[in-house]
Image (tube, rainbow, N blue to C red):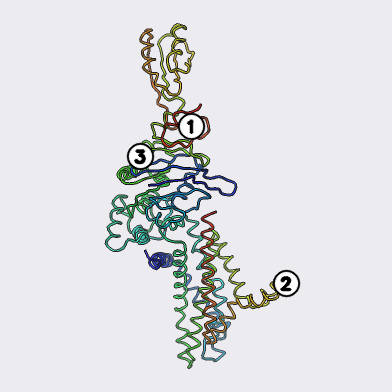
Amino acid sequence: MTAARTVAVVFRREFTGYFASPVAYVFLIVFLALAGAMTFFFGSFFQRNQADLDSFFVFHPWVYLFLMPAIAMRLWAEERKTGTVELLFTLPIATWHAVMGKFLAAWLFAGIALALTFPIWITVATLGAPDHGPILAGYIGSFLMAGGYLAIGSCLSATTKNQVIAFVLAAIVCFVFSMAGAEVVLGPIRELLPAGSVELVSSFSFLNHFAEMRKGVIDLRNLLYFLSVIGVFLFATVLVLDLKKGA
Amino acid sequence: MIEVQSLTKHFGPIRAVDDVSFSVAKGEVLGFLGPNGAGKSTTMKMITGFLAPTSGTAVVCGHDIRHDAIAAKTRIGYLPEGAPLYADMTARGFLNFIGASRGLSGAGRAQAVDRVVDMAQLSAVLDQPIETLSKGFTRRVGLAQALLHDPDVLILDEPTDGLDPNQKHHVRQVIDEMAPDKAIVISTHILEEVHAVCSRAMIIAQGRLLADGTPAELEALAHRHNTVTLRTRALPPSAERAGLARLDGVLKVEEDGETDMPSFRVIPRDGAAVLPAVSAYVTEHRWEVDEMRLEQGRLDDVFREITTGEITTGGAAAGGDAGREAAR
């Protein structure tokens, strides 16, 4: 069987798995409520009197910080807890096919949640004449950023069979990546590591890369950045899973 | 079809599986016996490619599980211990998923699903979520999943655990029917099962292979194998009793000193068949025998004696010959 087909088989099972339980609907409602509440209460969507969605996108990293680990925590921890990982890995499916299939299912699910925020785009388009370019760029950036958080969550979910631990670890690592450009992370780095590393670490910041995208700049570097984060953490997921197999 | 070569697995300082080698040919049903924690499941997990061995390897249908895992896995049907399944799926959805992941699609997959549903008698529950099924049905869905692609090699970790006697009987029947064209390994700690389905049995404990042979050969390892017990109406003269112990092949005679119902246990040396000699002896001396019984040695005894180290065998010998040279 081709790689694409096995990935698709895992993807399909995983994706329909989200909707087999109420978890998916709870998640979608929480996500929409949170995204909306942030935009209108903290983002002062109306008071700003601006026909853009910046006050909507600016909170996405913070919403994702908790909600993406919540999607990702079950990816591997649950399989390990219930023992189905043994079933999955004794099927003729390569580790990375399973990792890809599961990640893509989680990503598409997050994408659906994001897409369901479309009324806010309609709202802003009805009330004013927004520049649709930055809005589209914001959506693309937000989707890529969600993928980054999910890949981190996937990797940490593979390290444990406890979903709560997977969630907490993922939230911490996601926080570090979000805040990589801020003093809270850079302070300790400056103390502990050589000078050049500050630059390097701050260039890892989700916030900075996303900020550029929601301003409407779709720079290849930003795209590459998020795609590399996804690639690196999915690769790490494969490594963790293979390591567990040998342990 | 299965070649296990010096398979070893360490978990930290613990040797879960220690240099186990054996092979299973087509048509054989190998029963894996051992106390809990003996390394049965770990061995199976390595053969099926779920765990990587510390050293050694397993070759399934010519494919080395370490280097050619995907090809080996396509030839194996595996029921993991406890039959873990995706509980949120329906039995049908689950079997379709397994079929798809094994490269089956369309009519071929529908046919394969129908076949195993029939074999495992699942039609009544096909559209129920697996989490709502009874333990017996869950186990059978697990079995159906393992049989779906009609594999050459079948590895079943405690396939009848948690089933009621009828269901056990049914599963054994299914295994029996498939046995001629497959190599099957089952683990169990139900010893009657070994008699019911296995053509060969292996006992492992503490990760080591301790005995290997047909169920009858293993029984021959029991201390009491071929012991003749007889009960006489009156106590025979002591000279005659001493003569019994001097018969060919007799190791010793244990007397039970009750005077009104004296009984003797004639223990043979190395399980030799002493019944004819004993029988001729008592007839010749006109003992009034109320009861004469031949003990076959039971698998339970062998299992207990071997796994607690009371008897040791010639080690991991293929076939039962070395086993019979049991050192006491």
Q: Which mark is residue A191?
A: 2
Observer-side mark, 1 or 2, equals: 1
User: Distance between the Cα atoms at labels 2 and 3?
Assistant: 68 Å
Q: Chain of mark 1?
A: B
Amino acid residing under circle 1: Thr
* Label 3 Cα crowd, 10 Å radius (few <14 / some 14-19 / many 20+): many
Q: Chain of mark 3?
A: B
Q: Position of residue B7 (x, y in %)?
A: 49, 46
Q: Secondary structure at mark 1?
A: loop
Residue at 43% x, 24% y: name it: B271
Q: Position of residue B26 (x, y in %)?
A: 34, 44
Q: Position of residue A238 (x, y in %)?
A: 51, 63
Mark 1 and mark 2, same subunit?
A: no
Amino acid residing under circle 3: Val
Amino acid residing under circle 2: Glu
Q: Which mark is residue B197?
A: 3
The residue tagged 1 is B313
Q: Position of residue B299 (x, y in %)?
A: 42, 32
Q: Which mark is residue B82?
A: none
Position of B109 with respect to B229 (left or right) is left
Mark 2 and mark 3, same subunit?
A: no
